[in-house]
């Protein structure tokens, strides 16, 4: 037994010593290091991320997880990466699997596969955005029209998660000791101190703003003229409600609200920046968030920003269960950085967006393989190894900002094959 403990201690020391903070690295589309990493990543996706679904669609579907589970919001970011190579079919094929298991009231569970995850969690608000991304690539709106009514039902179901009828929706799930079903539903798995009770999430309601706006675009493209103004008006109203109920003037930040007691949950999470991405925040609010929080070295300005919890939070940490589980209480995640950078660019913070993007790129490329999430203080990768899901966006983010290109822009009609600028194929 003593020998086992000794070997474990040696292995821990070794694992800590073998990681070295990567040197400064400028973004260069001609970098052989970048090209080699992309080829390795694409090979991982081809081998382990495009898997045959034998339970619902009998088609090959896209996932970032080799254990054959297909998720909701992951799908949006995974398909953005595939768009760099002109690949669009997984937007539709994966969604067919989700629509096949839709309930009559519109409910769609957030994932399917061999593991019974999120059985009562509704698909996060990204379906319309996924449809828009795929349809803009193909230029064909027939699929969007075919599934339009089901998409409407899924979105309408979201607004049933509003029992106090104040217009804001909540993440659902039971609180079980130290585990929050609501945080699990949000995708920020272990943020149990943020998502208290029926948590009216800043992130959730910002996602819904974008879904409503995406539905307005789809309605226009398929000739549902009466629906266009309704979706636009609902999005406008929801933006106002987010600013009315979830913005705190004293601290200059957005927080979740517990619908059950009407109290604000004063936990600073990376989710508080989603109003920048969704275009919900005013310029004045963004200025305060940037100056007082994002660039604050005591809160979110770590060596490798943006940590998922502010460093001032009592349960902020870089290690969670020995990294056996996903850690959203301090680690840096690529999809949230991706959203923040594009949001900052929209508000005119180009230099800051580029700085975060380059730090993110350096962090990801500095590891020996693409990882699931990263230590915000050292840049060391954690979680799945290798990972071939949404972390892949880090390799193209600096290029997008340089080109002023945003594939998430709901007005963007030209979804570009950015891989041509680097010279790497998906084969």
Image (spheres, helix red, strand yellow):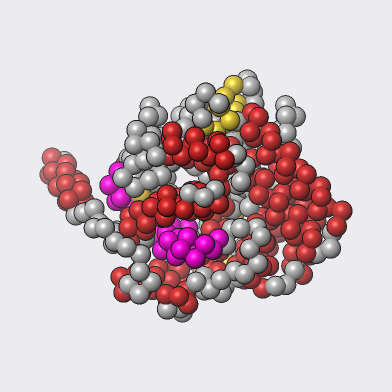
Percent across and percent down for residue 203 are: 57, 41
Percent across and percent down for residue 405 are: 54, 63
Residue toward you, 42 or 240 = 240
Q: Residue at x 64, y 35 (%)?
A: 242
Percent across and percent down for residue 292 are: 43, 33
Say left or right for 93 vs 41: right
Residue toward you, 384 or 57 = 384
Splitting the image into 4 quarters, where does residue 315 fall? Answer: top left
Q: Residue at x 32, y 63 (%)?
A: 26
Q: Residue at x 63, y 52 (%)?
A: 126
30 up-or-down from 78: above or below: below
Splitting the image into 4 quarters, where does residue 257 fall? Answer: top right
Q: Residue at x 35, y 75 (%)?
A: 30
- Residue 394 inside the magenta-drawn segment: yes
Say left or right for 122 vs 330: right
Percent across and percent down for residue 67 are: 47, 59
416 up-or-down from 401: above or below: below
- Residue 156 inside the magenta-drawn segment: no
Q: Is residue 272 visible?
A: yes
* Residues shaded magenta: 377-406
């Amino acid at each position: 037994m003593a020998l086992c403990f000794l070997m474990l201690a040696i292995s821990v020391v070794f694992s800590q010593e073998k990681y070295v903070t990567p040197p400064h690295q400028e973004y260069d589309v001609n970098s052989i290091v970048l090209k080699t990493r992309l080829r390795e990543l694409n090979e991982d996706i081809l081998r382990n991320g495009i898997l045959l679904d034998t339970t619902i669609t009998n088609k090959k579907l896209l996932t970032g997880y080799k254990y054959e589970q297909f998720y909701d919001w992951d799908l949006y970011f995974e398909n953005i990466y595939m768009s760099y190579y002109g690949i669009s079919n997984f937007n539709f094929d994966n969604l067919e699997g989700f629509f096949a298991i839709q309930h009559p009231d519109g409910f769609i569970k957030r994932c399917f596969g061999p593991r019974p995850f999120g059985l009562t969690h509704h698909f996060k608000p990204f379906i319309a955005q996924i449809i828009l991304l795929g349809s803009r690539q193909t230029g064909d709106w027939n699929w969007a029209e075919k599934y339009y009514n089901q998409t409407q039902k899924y979105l309408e179901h979201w607004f049933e998660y509003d029992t106090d009828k104040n217009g804001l929706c909540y993440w659902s799930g039971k609180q079980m000791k130290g585990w929050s079903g609501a945080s699990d539903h949000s995708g920020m798995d272990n943020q149990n101190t943020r998502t208290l009770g029926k948590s009216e999430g800043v992130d959730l309601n910002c996602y819904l703003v974008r879904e409503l706006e995406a539905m307005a675009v789809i309605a226009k493209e398929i000739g549902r003229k009466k629906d266009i103004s309704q979706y636009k008006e609902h999005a406008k109203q929801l933006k106002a409600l987010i600013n009315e109920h979830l913005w705190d003037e004293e601290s200059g930040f957005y927080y979740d609200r517990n619908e059950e007691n009407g109290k604000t949950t004063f936990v600073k999470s990376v989710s508080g920046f989603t109003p920048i991405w969704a275009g919900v925040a005013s310029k004045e609010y963004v200025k305060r968030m940037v100056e007082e929080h994002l660039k604050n070295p005591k809160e979110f300005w770590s060596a490798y920003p943006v940590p998922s919890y502010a460093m001032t939070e009592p349960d902020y940490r870089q290690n969670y269960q020995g990294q056996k589980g996903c850690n959203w209480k301090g680690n840096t995640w690529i999809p949230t950085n991706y959203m923040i950078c594009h949001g900052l660019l929209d508000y005119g913070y180009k230099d800051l967006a580029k700085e975060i993007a380059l730090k993110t790129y350096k962090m990801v490329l500095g590891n020996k393989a693409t990882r699931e999430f990263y230590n915000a203080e050292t840049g060391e990768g954690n979680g799945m190894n290798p990972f071939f899901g949404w972390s892949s966006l880090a390799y193209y983010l600096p290029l997008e900002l340089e080109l002023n290109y945003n594939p998430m822009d709901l007005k963007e009609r030209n979804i570009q094959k950015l891989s041509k600028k680097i010279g790497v194929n998906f084969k």
